Image (cartoon, rainbow, N blue to C red):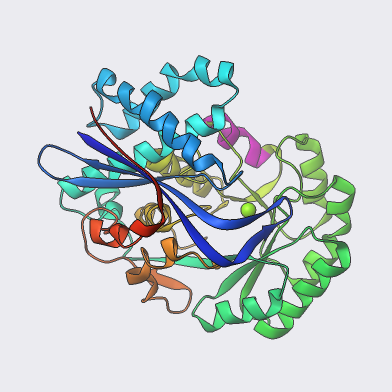
């Protein structure tokens, strides 16, 4: 197997603002695999924050993780390989204090191997995962900055989305003004959500209840920090009609097994480039559905991870919930996923009948000018 590790940094005109930081360019870390028969597979590794972290994760992939794939003998079984590598690197992850970056690299590797396996089988990833896969998935426009939020929400709905998510956590009055302003522009019939990105204390979150319910939010995402006690989350959940959402910062099977119920969540949002990859996303999605929670895969990176997320959601043939689509400027997302987003109508996109996630080398080569790392290794 030949692996190529690619880091791109795509310049953007408008920075991405969250309550915890600003992103001035769009980093992307991708793994391209090619087997002896010429079949290829792509996986994307989450690397948004801090934005210098993409190159570090690329080094972890090259020096630490890929050499272990050969040792495992499990390259043909991505899900088992992920379990094996997670166990093999468990102590190192603790000792290094880097469980996050290591889990993110393992997740992206698993995605690349799943894409490769689907292409070998000649099937779109969704149908490779399930013969019952849906041909289309529901999506929502996400990452709407506080500056000009109502107008951005309006543009998202005009583009074909039927749901959008606005960033909050920028002060009570500004948040309220943005949400009411957006609701006034997009009308009562489309769904709107808010993401606080862990900004609030439980008192601040509880005091948001009135606005959340008045605006008619479909969910409030991460009102509290991930490391806050379950009781505090439940207190916020009990204070409002609006369901709570979280999951992008969950980082173990135990988190997904225990926290949704313990915290009173109504929406579960795993990120397949941060933890677990494809097989774990499928498992979390099935479990969320079995517990009557919405399954809405989180994604705020480039096109490879977005398409992989869409295929998993389609594989579950899940009528409820939708895939997150960053509405901020990022050519690495919009151009790689251009084919499916050209089909956006009534909040749904169709998946083409192409093997794997449907991306080819030419699409990625088009970004060559923005490469900061290109490392090739054989194992
Ligand atoms: Mg979020």
Image quadrant assignment for residue 250: top right
Write the residue at 61% across / 41% down.
Answer: 249
> Residue 218: x, y in percent?
66, 65
Given residues 375 and 323, the one toward you in this image is: 375
Q: Residue furthest left?
A: 37
Q: Residue at x 33, y 57 (%)?
A: 368
Query: Residue 214 at what x, y percent from top left?
Result: 81, 71
Q: Quadrant of the N terminus?
A: top left
Relative image position of residue 126 (x, y in whole percent): 30, 54
Using the image, determine if residue 158 lies above or below residue 331.
Answer: below
Residue at 39% in and 70% down: 349
Q: Is residue 257 magenta?
A: yes
In the picture shown, does residue 223 fall above or below 189? above
Residue 135: x and y, percent? 31, 65
Between 113 and 252, the one nearer to me in the picture: 113
Q: Is 132 displayed left or right of 261 in the figure? A: left
Name the chief secondary structure element in magenta. helix
Q: Is residue 322 visible?
A: no
Relative to the observer, which residue lies in front, 101 or 235? 101
Relative to 142, residue 75 above or below: above
Region of the chain picked out in magenta, as a range: 253-261
Residue 329 inside the magenta-drawn segment:
no
Total number of numbered labels?
Answer: 0
Residue 84 visible: yes
Q: Quadrant of the C terminus?
A: top left
Q: Report which quarter residue 153 is drawn in.
A: bottom right
Give left or right: position of 140 versus 165. Answer: left
Residue name at image x 27 percent, y 66 percent: 352
């Amino acid at each position: 197997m030949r692996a190529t590790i690619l880091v791109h940094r795509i310049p953007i005109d408008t920075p991405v603002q969250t309550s915890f930081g600003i992103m001035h360019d769009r980093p992307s870390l991708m793994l391209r695999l090619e087997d002896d028969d010429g079949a290829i597979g792509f996986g994307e590794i989450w690397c948004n924050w801090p934005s210098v972290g993409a190159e570090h994760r690329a080094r972890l992939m090259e020096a630490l993780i890929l050499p272990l794939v050969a040792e495992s003998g499990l390259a043909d079984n991505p899900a088992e390989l992920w379990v094996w590598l997670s166990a093999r690197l468990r102590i190192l992850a603790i000792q290094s204090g880097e469980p996050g970056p290591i889990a993110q690299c393992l997740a992206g590797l698993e995605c690349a191997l799943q894409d490769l396996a689907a292409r070998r089988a000649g099937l779109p990833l969704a149908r490779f995962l399930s013969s019952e896969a849906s041909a289309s998935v529901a999506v929502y426009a996400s990452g709407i900055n506080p500056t000009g939020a109502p107008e951005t929400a309006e543009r998202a709905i005009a583009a074909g989305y039927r749901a959008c998510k606005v960033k909050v956590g920028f002060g009570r009055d500004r948040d309220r003004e943005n949400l009411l302003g957006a609701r006034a522009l997009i009308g009562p019939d489309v769904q709107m959500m808010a993401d606080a990105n862990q900004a609030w204390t439980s008192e601040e979150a509880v005091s948001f209840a009135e606005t959340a319910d008045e605006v008619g939010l479909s969910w409030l995402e991460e009102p509290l920090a991930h490391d806050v006690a379950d009781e505090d989350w439940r207190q916020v959940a009990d204070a409002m009609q609006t369901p709570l959402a979280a999951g992008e910062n969950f980082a173990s099977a135990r988190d997904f097994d225990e926290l949704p119920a313990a915290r009173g969540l109504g929406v579960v949002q795993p990120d397949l480039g941060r933890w677990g990859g494809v097989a774990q996303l499928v498992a979390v999605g099935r479990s969320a559905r079995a517990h009557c929670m919405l399954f809405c895969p989180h994604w705020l990176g480039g096109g490879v991870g977005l398409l992989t997320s869409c295929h998993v959601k389609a594989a579950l043939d899940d009528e409820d919930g939708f895939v997150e689509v960053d509405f901020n400027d990022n050519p690495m997302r919009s151009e790689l996923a251009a084919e499916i987003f050209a089909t956006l109508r009534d909040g749904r996109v169709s998946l083409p009948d192409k093997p794997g996630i449907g991306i080819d080398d030419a699409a990625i080569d088009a970004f060559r000018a923005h490469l900061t790392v290109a490392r090739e290794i054989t194992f």
